[in-house]
Image: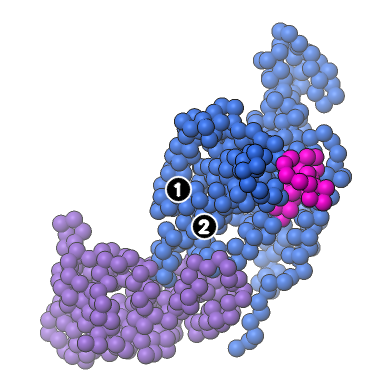
Chain colours: A purple, B blue
Amino acid sequence: MNAAIELKGVTKSFGNTAIIRGVDLAVPKGERHAIIGPNGAGKSTLFNLISGRYPVSGGDILLNGASIAGLKPFEINRKGLSRSFQVTNIFPRMSVFENLRCAVLWPLGYKYSFWHRLGGLKDANARAEQMMESIGLKGRRDTSAGVLSYAEQRALEIGITIAGGAEVILLDEPTAGMSRTETADAVELIRKVSQGKTLIMVEHDMGVVFDLADKISVLVYGEVIASDRPQMIRGNQAVQEAYLGTESH
Amino acid sequence: MARIKYQPINLGRWLVWGGTALLMIALPLILTAGFTLTLLSQIGVGIIFALSYNMLLGQGGMLSFGHAVYSGLGAYFTVHAINLIGKGGFYFPITLMPLIGGVAGMVFGVIFGYVTTKKSGTTFAMISLGIGEMVFACSLMFPGFFGGEAGVSTNRVIGTAFLGITYGPSLQVYYLIVAWALACMAAMFAWTQTPLGRMANAVRDNPERAEFVGYDTHMVRFLTLVLSSFFAGIAGGLSCINYEIVTAENVGALRSAGVLMATFLGGAGFFFGPIIGSVVFFFMVTAVGAITKAWAFYLGLLFLLMVLYAPGGFASLIVMHVPVIKARLMRRLWLPYAAAIATGMVLLSGVVGMVEITYHYSLEADTAPEMALFGLAFKVTDGAPWAVACALLLGGLVISRLAWRAVGRAWTEIVHALQQRQST
C-alpha cells in the first residue's frame, strides 16, 4: 500500500451533531488531491482531523501506513505532514524571514536548542531565504508579517506550510479571497512547490481545482459521494445534483 | 542568490554593551551619597531578576505572579550553603555562590514549571499566583529551612581571601553583582538569539501555528521557564550575599509584584526594557523612599500613568524617537517637550505638595505640625499651604494639558513627515 494518507471510516461529532459521517479516502504518494463540497460539508473539519487539531470520534487515519489518529499536531507535523489554514495563521509580530525560519527549525533538527546562535545556522537561514524567494516575498524580508497585504500573507501562509519540507501538504482554501491575478500567481506557486509531494487541498474556486488536481473528492454532509479524475467528476450525476448544479458559475 | 548577511557584530551593539559595563563600574566612584551603593547593588540584582522575568513576560508571553518563588528559594539555598561552608561542611568560593542559587531556582523551575506551563494566558497567571502563595505558606510550615519570621541570616566573609577579596566591604559585593549582572545580561540576550528563544516568541504570538510547525508549546514554555528560574535563582543568591539575610519576604507576592512592575515600567517588549525598569523601580523604592514615606504612592502613580499613556514602558518611549532622530526632526519636539516638562513640574509640585502635606497632617498634626517642603517651612494646620498646593495641582493640570496638546500636534506633524519621506 503506497498511500501517503489513508482515512478509514473516519467520523467526527460535536455533541450530538455528526459532522464527518464515515469518510474513507486514500491519497497515493505524489498525487494532487482536491476536496470540494458545499459550505458546511465538513471540509475544514476533515483537515482539522487529519492534522490533529481535533481528535477523531471514530475510525483511523494513516500517514504512510502508520496510524496518526490521536496524536498531537506537533507529533503529526514531525512525521512529515504540514498544513495551511483557511484563516491566515502566521506569526504577525515577526518578520517574513523570521516566520519562515521558525518553520524550518524543527525539521532541520534544531529542536529546543539554546546553544545554537540563529545567525550562525547556515542551513536554516539559506532555506528560509530560498523559500522567501519561491513565494515572491524577497522584497519584504524584514517586514512584519502582520502588515503584509492579504495576498502576501496568504503566500506566507503557504510558505510556512511547505518550508519545513513536509512530504504531505494540506492546503485549506489557499486562494480564498484573492483577486483573479493573485489566484493565478497562487496556483503557479502551489504547482511549483508541491512538485513531487502529496498535496491535499480544500478549494472553492473550481478553476483552481480543475487546473491543479489529479483527483477530486466531493464531500457532502460529512460523506464522500464521489472520488475520481476531474473530468469524471464533471460528468458525475450525483455531484452535479449535490454540488455543482447549485453552485456552478 | 545574494550572499546572506549575518549580523552578529555591529558597532552600535558593542557601544551599548561597553557603555553599560563602564557605567556600572564607574558609578560608585562618581556618586558617593550615603545610599548610593545600596541602591546600585539593588539595581544590579534587580536587573538580573527583571530580565529573567521578562524571558517569561516579554519573550514567552507568560504573565507570572509568582516569580519571586525562584529567586527566593535560590536565596534560601544560598544562605544555607554559606552557613554550611562557614561551619566547614564543604568549600565553595563566594564568588561562584550565586550558581548555587541558580541551580536551586532551576530545580524548582523544573518542579513547578512543568505544571504552570501546561497552559498559557490567564490559567498560567493564576497557577503562578497559587504556587507563590503555597511556597510563602511553606515558609511558616517549615521554620527549620525558612527560619520563621526572623528568616535565616549568615556571614558572607568566610574562607580564605583570594587576591585580597573578602567580600567584607560592600563595594566588593557591588562589583561581584556587576560581574554577575553583566554575565547574565549577555547570556539572556544570547538566549533571545537561539532557536528556543525565537520559538518562545513564536509560541507567545501564535501558539497554534507553533504546534503546526513541529513545536510542543508546553515544552517551549517549560524550558523557557526553567532557564528563567535559573537566572532568577542567581539574582536570589546575589541578594543573599548582599544582605546576609533571607526572609520569607524573598519568596512573597510583594516581591513577585515588584518584578512585574519593574519589567512593565521599563518595557516588556524590548530586551533592555527591564534594565531601565529596574533602575527606575529601585530609584523610586530606595532613593525616593529615603526622602518620603509616600514613596509607594508615587511609585503607584508612576505605574498607573505608564500603563495608561505608555504601555510599552520607558524603552518604547526611547525607541519611538529613533526614527525621528535619524530623520533629523527632533528640533520640532524640543520646544513642546520643554513646555511639557516645565508644566509637568508645576503639576508634580502640586501633587507632591498635596500628598506630603496630607501625610504629615494625618501622622503628626497634633505633635509636630511644622514641616518643610521645597525649602519652605510651614505648619500643616494652616490653610495657606493647602491652598497653594491645591492651586499648583489644578493650575498644573490645566497648563500641562495645553503643553501635551502641543506635544501631540508636533508628533502628528512628524509622523506625517516621516510617512511622506518613506513614500517618496
Q: Secondary structure at mark 2?
A: helix
Residue B65: percent from the left, percent from the top? 51, 42
Residue to which mark 1 is pinned: B112
- Residue at position x 60%, y 66% in the image: B193
Whichever of labels 2 and 1 marks the residue nearer the N terminus, that label is 1
Identify which residue, A160 or B233, lies in the foreground.
Answer: B233
Picture quadrant of residue A4? bottom left
Mark 2: amino acid:
Thr
| Residues tagged by mark 2 and mark 1 found on one chain of the structure | yes
Q: Give the magenta-colored segment's residue range.
A: B157-182
Identify which residue, B42 or B395, lies in the foreground.
Answer: B42
Identify which residue, B289 or B255, lies in the foreground.
Answer: B255
Image-based side of A126 in relation to B22, left or right: left
Residue to which mark 2 is pinned: B224
Image-based side of B66 in relation to B390, left or right: left
Residue A85: percent from the left, percent from the top? 37, 70
2 and 1 marks in contact (CB < 8 Å): no
Picture quadrant of residue B183? bottom right
